[in-house]
Image: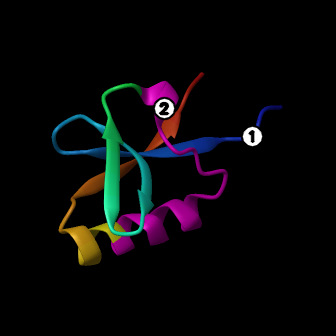
Amino acid sequence: MTETEYVLLTDDQTYFVEYLIGELVLSKSISEAMKFNDEHLALKFKKMLHSSCRLTTSVNTYID
């Protein structure tokens, strides 16, 4: 059984890659997206990105 992974998808259909030193990195490629193996952690990142960057995302299941 494989472990479920999650990614954050923006309203513009780009994926969250990283957020370092105040710089937000997004990509149109799901393969570059940051993968979370814990849905609760993905939700925390979603809330953090909304409060710090005003970025609206959804938590989606990553399928390789």
Magenta highlight range: 30-48
Q: Is 55 or 5 nearer to us in this picture?
A: 55
Q: How many marks?
A: 2
Position of residue 2 measured from the top left corner of the image (x, y, whole percent)? 78, 33
Picture quadrant of residue 45: bottom left
Residue at 41%, 60% in the rendered image:
19
Amino acid beneath label 1: Glu
Mark number displayed over residue 14: none
Q: Does 27 sit above or below residue 34?
A: above
Mark number displayed over residue 3: 1
Please give left or right for residue 47 compared with residue 41 in the image. Answer: left
| Residue ID for mark 2 | 32
Mark 1 nearby-residue class (10 Å; few <14, some 14–19, many ≥20) = few
| Residue 35 belongs to magenta span | yes
Residue at 21%, 61% in the rendered image:
55
Position of residue 1 measured from the top left corner of the image (x, y, whole percent)? 83, 31
